[in-house]
Amino acid sequence: METEKSTDNAQSMPVNPAALFLGMGWTKSFAEAPMKAYAAVSKEMLGATARQLEACTDYVRKLAECDDPAKSVACWNEFVRQSMASSFEEGQHVIEAFQKGLSSAAAAK
């Protein structure tokens, strides 16, 4: 009977031998690198979104000032051109932020 009790306790409480000897501190470096990179990317993407919203606001303001269809089309063309250029530039910034986050986390190891 005592043998049954000891096996029941062993089955109900699994123990990781590595955690007993090393602690869980070694997992910190594995978790930090992606988190720093994702935080940097999120910050950059939120900034890009804010800048794009400002550009949209400016576009609508300029569009409201247009008094004929030709000016409206010219305003739209300018907005599309600027949006495409800024999207490409913002994409580069996001990639750079991701790479910088990964390299700084790797250097911290």
Image: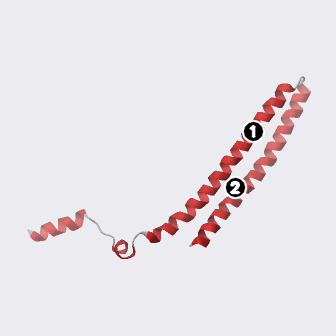
- Image coordinates for residue 53, horizontal then vertical, percent: 72, 39
The residue type indicated by label 2 comes to Val
Q: Nearer the viewer, mark 2 or mark 1?
A: 1
Kindly indicate the quadrant of the structure image that contains residue 77.
top right
- Quadrant containing the C terminus is bottom right
Number of other residues with Cα within 10 Å of mark 1, as a class: few under 14, some 14 to 19, many 20 or more: few
Q: Residue 57: where, in percent of width, then height?
A: 76, 34
Q: Which residue ends up furthest to the top in the rendered image?
A: 67
What residue sits right under mark 2 in the picture?
Answer: 94
Give SS at disc 2: helix
Amino acid under label 1?
Answer: Glu
Mark 2–mark 1 CB contact (< 8 Å): no
Disc 1 designates what residue?
Answer: 54
Locate residue 37: give its quadrant: bottom right
Residue plotted at (59% across, 57% down): 38
Q: Secondary structure at mark 1?
A: helix
Circle 2: is it few (<14), some (14-19), or many (20+) Cα within 10 Å? some
**Number of on-image labels:** 2
Left or right: residue 61 versus residue 49 is right
Location of residue 28 in the rendering, given as x and y in whole percent from the top left corner: 49, 67
Q: Residue at the far bottom: name it.
A: 21
